[in-house]
Image (cartoon, rainbow, N blue to C red):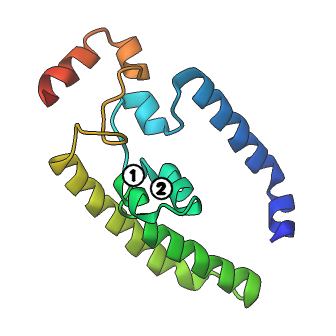
Amino acid sequence: MIKDLWDNRAPIIALAIMWALAELVFHRFCPVVIMSGFPCPGCGLTRALFNLITLHPIKALEYNPSYPFWVALLVAFVIRRHVQGKSTRILRYPLMAVCLITIGIYIWRMTALFPGKEPMVFFEGNVLGRIVPFYNQLVNDLIH
């Protein structure tokens, strides 16, 4: 696992820098939220994982109910690659299934919970709102 981290250090460092800059400027990391103001299917996954790590698994479900599927996939990946030393290609179908589950949950959240509490809110500081003067007002008129 250390070798994988070392071999991918450049993209990891680039991602960390982009994350820090996005948080500094927009107080958000998700490119979809930053650009459009709308939450994406993965919105809340980082906060859900932090809540899981800090032993708040039920609270984590509030941020993104699909997080257990992603955690299971990550555990399967680590076991397959680093414990068994086998190829992870076999996980491509479970990955597709988890993506579809996440999108399904997203559709439900957007129809039942949006706009609600974080992360299912409209971000007023989005780039489109800064470029197109009437964008935020139009969205607010549609969702309220």
Question: Residue beneath label 1, please?
Answer: 63
Q: How far across and how far down the image is residue 97, in percent?
A: 38, 74
Query: Which residue is rendered at x = 65% and y = 28% of the image?
Result: 21
Amino acid tagged 1: Tyr
- Are circles 1 and 2 on residues that touch, CB within 8 Å? yes
Asked which quadrant contains residue 121, the reply is top left
- State left or right for residue 91 relative to residue 37: right
Seen from the viewer's position, the closer of residues 14 and 44 is: 44
Seen from the viewer's position, the closer of residues 136 and 65 is: 65
Q: Where's the C terminus, which quadrant?
A: top left
Sequence-first disc among 1 and 2: 2
Q: Tell me the distance, in whole angstroms, between the alpha carbons under discs 1 and 2.
A: 5 Å
Q: How far across and how far down the image is residue 27, in percent?
A: 53, 28
- State left or right for residue 17 relative to residue 24: right
Amino acid tagged 2: Ala
Q: Where's the N terminus, which quadrant?
A: bottom right
Please, which residue is most extreme toward the front here? 55
Q: Which mark is residue 48?
A: 2
- State left or right for residue 71 relative to residue 128: right
